[in-house]
Image: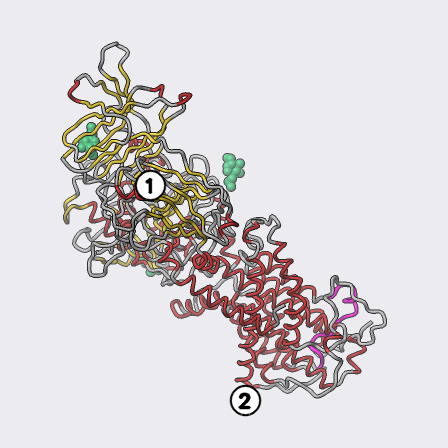
Amino acid sequence: MPSTGPLALFAILAVLVFSLTNKDLADTLSPQGCRMSYMSPSYVLQDSFNTSWSTLAQRYSLWLYREVGWDAQDPNGLPVLFIPGNAGSSHQVRSIASSASRQYYSSPGQVSSEFLSTGVTALDFYAVEFNEDLSAFHGTTLQSQIEYTTKAVDFILSRYPPQTSLVILGHSMGGIVGTALLPSERVSAILTMSTPHDLPPARFDSRIDDIYAKIRHTLVNDTTPILSLCGGSTDTMIPSESCVQPLQGDGIYRKTIFTSALEGAWTGVGHREMVWCHQVRWRVARALLEMSPQKSMAARKAVLGTWFRDGHEPPPGILGQPNDSSSFELSDRSSYDIIPSGLQLVRKPTGSRVYLLPIPSTTGGSPIKLGVLVGRGTIASIPPQSQHPLNVNIYVCSSSEAGNDFPHCEYLEPSTLKLVPQPISGEPFPRPRVDTDPSSGGVDESDGVVLYETEIMPSRGQWVGVKVQNGKGEGWVVAGFNHKEAITNLIPTTSLLFRNIHTEVEAKGSLRLDVWFPRLLSNALIVYRLTPQFSSTENCAESHLAPLLIHTSNSVESHYYPLTTSGDRHILLHTHIPAPYHSRLIGEAQGLHLIIISSGISSCISQLQGLEISIDWPASLGRWASRYLITTISWTAGISAMLLFLGLGMYDRGAPMPSIAQSTQYYGRILLRFMLPASLLASFLPWPTGFYLGLGGSGLFAPLAPLILLIASGLVIVSWWNLVVLIWMLRPLRRVFVVRKHEGLGVGRSTIASMCIILMMVFLFVPWQVAYLGCWVYQLLTCAGSEPSVATPRPAFVEAYPLLASSGQEDTTGDVSRPGVDERVRTRALNQQDNYRLNCHILLFMTCLVPLAAPVLAVWVRTLITAGLTTPFDGDHFFIGVAPFLVLVDFASWTSAPIFVRRSFEDHISTRWALASVAVVSFLVGGTRPHMIFEAGKISVGILVGVRIGRRYWGGTPWTAS
Ligand SMILES: *[C@@H]1O[C@H](CO)[C@@H](O)[C@H](O)[C@H]1NC(C)=O
Ligand SMILES: *[C@@H]1O[C@H](CO)[C@@H](O)[C@H](O)[C@H]1NC(C)=O
Ligand SMILES: *[C@@H]1O[C@H](CO)[C@@H](O)[C@H](O)[C@H]1NC(C)=O
């Protein structure tokens, strides 16, 4: 079993490995190809939105964006409100606002012909400025932002005709502020970007949980359309699984779009880049323009459905309908060609023509799959924004009943109609941005190939009619029936642990090939490495669609990868759902489902021979790191509480208080031996979402529990080493701060007075977290100031150390070293040593709690700088919470009597079990509710102080044991 040294080294090493693997993860998993956006910004302060509207107006401000040279000086359209996120700025509105102006006006003052007589008006972009407040860490700050924004909506709408409503645009935590405004008839739709909808990113404040719970409750019945745009693994600030909207009620528009699948973007987008990435911002601006004047919910949903599509659903309404007649008769023999079945390619079509493909008969009349690809053109109205004239519509045709020879054609509805990217062979995909070239990076608005798929019963007709119109001698059309069976490989995940597997693939002559690994686990914690294998490594020439791999892992997430013959060919397959701590409501897909699309006739696809698949360990480890960081921090707090619990248990039995070295050694040697297997077994239990590892009993990841336990244990030891160094450095200063020890006199008047002042300050304006940090420093000084060791003989440590008590019942019969008796026997020096060691345990425990309080501290300091002391910090002034710590560290600093004296009733249930509950809380809910550990810590210290120090603090007589 690992002892303390190796354990600590292991933890340091693990932290190093995990941070290294996590560092470049965004670039390797999902590179970004975004164009830069340019604008001429100006911001007009809305100073009539002052304190007569909201008292928060002193702290925050409201701005109106105006594109210089394009927008009129005054508001002249419909309002949109932008809400920035954690540490965000109102200026982040500029890319989207600028794009809206430049799309609406074709030149300054000239409305674009597209929008003339459509009812679309210009947009007035307002943005709230929160002075880069850290809203993700602090519920009260978030609540202030919500209150201010509510008033801002009232103010903005007061300047527009009655019945006007506005669209909310929220970035990151701003999206939470936006959804918290609901229910409201003043908000017509909400568009969020990189917003953590499902789980707050920092979970150190219970009030953030409350806000989330309230939003969740509201959204059950609220019908306001909400669209969530997520950047995928490129977003390193929030794990994108939190960005997925949890609820999708009937008929309520709650869509989540990953930019990796967003048509016309097909790139991962980083957290901050989301607001300026050109491929995203112009769509957002366009959707806002078209959505704002819409009065009905259905029309607003249709606009969102038009501009934000990821191909997971059939196109909405008009987009999927032929933009031509829905049926026609081919009465002129010269207007159509009957072409043989199989894949057919029309290159550079000119004019208009109908191509009839005979529908092959199938065994038993089962449906047959049809696929059509169109390059540089549209099918029906997909894509909605295209500069290509070529238009294709698909029909099913049969000889008309009238008996004449003229085929009669009916519109054939698609099952899939979407735009897929067309990577340039030999280039990375998406194309990275080159700093010197403003128009580089990712795809262009007119890029992409339209993919049409449907299943057709052979009985429906004789031919499929592909109606090509408006050919101007460019573009191409490929159509054909797909006879290929899906390739299924039943390899289980466990066999991938040790080796790679190879699947043969033959996709020539087919538009689409499905490859399915039904037994491979699909989870955010696992990344697969897939390498296509080609017969030749030459760069193959490709004029149409080169082989493209589509990985659809669930109902909201798809990724596209080119299968290239040259260069670095491996692909990292990853997903965000299911993920730890997230509910699995949304289409949990089993297995790994891959689709290879190509124009089927190129040389590239005929060279494809197989796929090799393995687990990519570095990327997987990197993903574990970001998902279990909070859990690990929480577990260290639990382990430090256990050390204090163990030490007290030993002390209660009359043995001397063990030193930290002894406690950790005992923990590492004996206790871990039980805890490691127990933690492993516990992972198999069907925990509810949010508990323990958040995996609900998935066996494959069970080893994560002992791993995290080992790392957390090591980190506690490392923390102690750091404290030893700190104590050692502070020791020379001890003359300055050391408090004279005394016994039984009780606390001095001056101390009572200063404590009252501290509690008053906490009550009035300092958050308790500051007082807690003060307590921690005080305890550190106490440890540095006291004498660590004495030369008194004492009982051997190991023999006296009892086996871990398995219940609160302790054997008291004949135990001569019970505290009450002991106290009289023990020398003062032994007391001093016990106190020192107990103080060290308390210090370590308090240290491991510091990370849970630190975020709010940071917010407070930050708010102090930007808004001054006047800012209310409601809810953090509950001074009773910190009072036990104050009493404890103060008492510990001056008493020479034992700090803790066990009471007689503790024979039945010892109060130290309160500490065990801290450990239990941290292990069970540390991953999602770390703030509960602090609550449990406060309560348990409160109990210990109340019972074991109690009135001795005021100089009351010590209790004698029964
Ligand atoms: C707020 O602004 C309005 C309009 O500009 C003004 O009439 C009012 O006096 C202002 N209130 C305060 C408290 O400054
Ligand atoms: C939502 O509506 C249903 C049916 O109308 C009702 O039973 C339920 O209580 C509502 N829930 C909330 C949170 O308002
Ligand atoms: C259909 O769309 C194409 C290309 O967008 C266009 O050229 C054509 O005129 C449209 N046809 C009709 C009937 O609107």
Q: Which residues are magenta?
A: 897-910
The residue that disc 2 covers is 732
- Under mark 1, the amino acid is Arg
Colour logic: secondary structure
In this rendered view, identify the residue nearer to me: 235 or 509: 509
Does the magenta portion include 56?
no
In this rendered view, identify the residue nearer to me: 902 or 671: 671
Taking 562 as reference, is 676 left or right?
A: right
Does the magenta portion include 907?
yes
- Under mark 2, the amino acid is Pro
* Residue 124 appears in the rendering: no
Of the numbered discs in the image, which one, if any, rests on residue 309?
1
- Residue 463, picture quadrant: top left
Image quadrant in which the N terminus is located: bottom right
Image quadrant in which the C terminus is located: bottom right
In this rendered view, identify the residue nearer to me: 7 or 490: 490
Element marked by disc 1: loop
In the image, farthest residue toward the right = 814
